Amino acid sequence: MFVPSNLLPSWLAVLLTEKFFNACIIHEEERKNEKNIYCLDCCISFCPHCLTPHQSHRLLKIRRYVYHDVIKLDDASKLIDCALVQSYTSNSAKVVFLNQRPQTKNSRGSGNVCSTCDRSLQDPYLYCSLSCKIDHVVRTEGGLSKYLRECNFMALPDPGLDDGLLTPDTVLEPAGSVRTSSGSAGYGELGCMSLACTATTEIVRKKRSSLLRAACRPVSSPVSEIPAGRRKGTPHRAPLH
């Protein structure tokens, strides 16, 4: 993030620089003590066990996928204009990355790329994360005020339905992506980093193995078989005249 913090509202400057999912030092002995809740009124992050003093405040749930922080697009859109920021679909909900992610090579010249960090993008997106859009807008327009939204209420999701973690079994897909006739996904760079569910893969392998065993099993003709223990009958001879 290259934008000076004095050009951003306090809640946004802290949100983009905060380190989420560290263990809460107050509740070190508790389970699920990761700091994944952000209070927009107090500009601090905390764990679910610290929630009580902030229950009447505007609260944002931070989620994580492959060590990177994401938030739901619906939540982000209540706070800032997210147009042209690439979103991804996970668990039937669209999410956006908070900050740009490290990349090993420069993607410029290889199609549509992020206007800030040159990461490969799908059309018609221009930014790979919220911070990249904010950086570009401030540099080119001098301010962010017309992109900010007024939000007076933001509540957390039901804790029994949402733990904020996108597990390795979750596959993030770019919004609007389609699968090709060969069964592969046209996800570009994301397709290489997505992890398919290993349990599903194992089930498919077992099914294929069962089918192969059934196909290769020898089939005996029931006519040629004689049940075990059955004696051959006494032959009948023609009478002598």
Image (cartoon, rainbow, N blue to C red):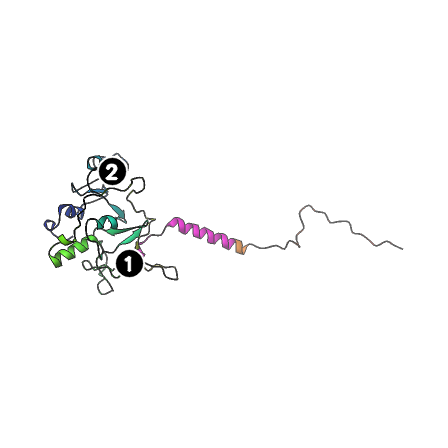
Who is closer to the viewer here, 211 or 153? 153
**Image position, residue 127 (x, y; %):** 21, 57
Q: Residue at x 15, y 57 (%)?
A: 137
| Separation of residues labelled 2 and 1 (CA atoms) | 34 Å
Give the structural element (helix, strand or loop) at label 1. helix
Q: Is residue 217 magenta?
A: no
Secondary structure mainly formed by the magenta segment: helix
Relative to the observer, which residue lies in front, 80 or 221?
Answer: 80
- 206 within the magenta span: yes
Task: Classify 190 as above or below 110.
Answer: above
**Mark 1 residue type:** Glu
Please state the horizontal and vertical placement of residue 31, each as a whole percent of the image: 28, 36
Query: Which residue is tagged 2?
Result: 48
In the rendered structure, the answer to whether residue 118 lies left or right of residue 182 reads: left
Q: Tag 2, which secondary structure?
A: helix
Kind of residue at disc 2: Pro
| Residue at 25%, 49% in the rendered image | 74
Start and end of the magenta stretch? Answer: 187-213
Q: Which residue is mark 1?
A: 189
